[in-house]
Image (tube, helix red, strand yellow):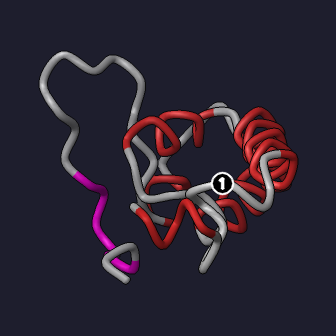
Amino acid sequence: MGQEKTAQTKQPKGIRLPIVRTAADIDKLPHLSDEEKALAKANLKKVAPSDGWYLLGNNPELQWFWQLIELALVHRLAPDAQMIPFSPMNLIC
């Protein structure tokens, strides 16, 4: 999608933590090790494209953990979860 930009993305005014939208953003984070940067780049393909998820990119292990929790909750709500394709709630919404 639009996540394949090469330049660092622009930060919204008033946000202190960098929003990590692209691989270039990840490469500019000085506090991450190479292993954490690899995990953060893998996470980019798995999380929803929203600023909340992108802020969690500053801590890729926490981002991965919350993505796992979200998936567990979605499956716990099955079959009546809006997030499950073709479920009754998905079709209604």
In the picture provided, is 32 more to the left or to the right than 22? right
Out of 52 and 77, give the one closest to the viewer.
77
- Look at the numbered disc 1 and give the secondary structure of its residue: loop
Q: Residues within 10 Å of mark 1 (few under 14, many from 20)?
A: some
Q: Quadrant for residue 21, please give it.
A: bottom left
Give the extent of the magenta segment. Answer: 4-9
Out of 73 and 87, give the one closest to the viewer.
87
Residue at position x 48%, y 35% in the image: 55
Read off the residue under disc 1: 81
In the picture provided, is 53 more to the left or to the right than 65? left
Rendered position, 93 above or below 33: below
In the picture provided, is 75 more to the left or to the right than 47? right
Name the amino acid type tagged 1.
Answer: Ala
Q: Is residue 35 magenta?
A: no
Residue at position x 39%, y 61% in the image: 93
**Does the magenta stretch mainly form a helix, a strand or a loop?**
loop
Quadrant (top left, top right, bottom left, bottom right) of the N terminus = bottom left
Residue 56 image point, x, y percent: 58, 35
Rendered position, 14 above or below 43: above
Q: Is residue 5 magenta?
A: yes
